[in-house]
Image (cartoon, grey):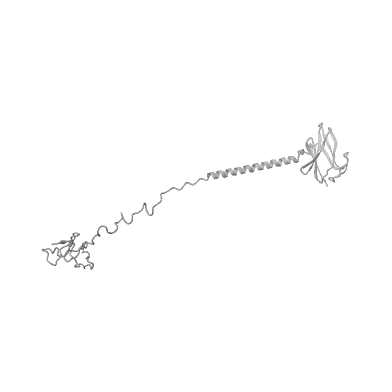
Amino acid sequence: MQQYCNNCSAPITAGMTACARCGAPVAIGSGGYDPTVRAGQPPGTGYGSQPYGPPPIDPYGAPPPQPGYGAPPPPPGFGAPPGAGYGAPPGVGYGAPQQPFMAPPPKKSKTWLYVLIGILVVVLLACGGIAFALNRAGNAIVNAVNTVGATVTIPVSERHISNVHIGVGDREGNISQEQTTFTQEDFIVIDFTVTTDESGAQVLLKLYSGSTFVDQIAPITLDTGTHDYFFGFRITGADDYTAQLIYNGTDEQNVNFTVT
């Protein structure tokens, strides 16, 4: 009769002292051979004949597993249970936990900077134009001040004043010596001829040092027709001078001279 393990119900072969599946000891004297089986012939296991004979006995008490039965499963509760799937459970996604995606903040537009630079350029250009205009206007004013009473010189053919002479003379207008260089003690005489048909016309003498107005002599009221006239004066101050003979507000003749 076939003997079975009292612990796991695995078949027990004659001569085994422990169950090949669970290692439980086989009770001595329990069971025996099937009377229909010839003595010495092990019962069939369903896995074919044993080609290598009986297995060696484990010196520590548990015999090695019989061929065909495989290694006994470990008792429940031993060893760590496998995780779900293969290997350690993966984290969320792949690899290390990921931070939630956040879109980068939008870049600030620099349009306002360009507009501001444009405004500054326009303001600077406008200020430069205003400064230039003021400078030109100032120069014009200075020139006008420096030439107060002076008028544009007219062509010779249209002039009323002619035959202009300058030199050292007397208070009667007589020139003793024509010259253009004088000392500060000399009495300078400028005589000239005027032809006019305008009643009440006048001739005025203005003196300039360069472009700077120095003095003027009272005007002479003219008679109609052609007549001779003169201006006499002294100048204190060494410099180069210009005498302007102005007919009714028009500069008609200029005489240059020097006082030492």
Left or right of 27: which side holds 148?
right
Q: Residue at x 70, y 41 (%)?
A: 138
* Up/down of 236 relative to 38, above or below: above
Pick whichever, 47 or 72, lies toward us.
Answer: 72
Q: Tell me residue 67's x, y (percent).
A: 21, 64
Residue 215 picture quarter: top right
Q: Tell me residue 202's x, y (percent).
A: 81, 34
* Up/down of 6 relative to 126, above or below: below
Pick whichever, 2 or 155, lies toward us.
Answer: 2
Q: Residue at x 61, y 42 (%)?
A: 123
Residue 249 picture quarter: top right
* Up/down of 187 relative to 21, above or below: above
Q: Residue at x 59, y 44 (%)?
A: 120
Q: Tell me residue 105's x, y (percent).
A: 46, 47
Pick whichever, 77 or 72, lies toward us.
Answer: 77
Residue 150 picture quarter: top right
Left or right of 109: which side holds 64?
left
**Residue sticking out furthest to the front:** 28
**Residue sticking out furthest to the left:** 36
Left or right of 91: which side holds 201?
right
Tally the marks.
0
Q: Tell me residue 102's x, y (percent).
A: 43, 48
- Location of the N terminus (image quadrant): bottom left
**Residue sticking out furthest to the top:** 199
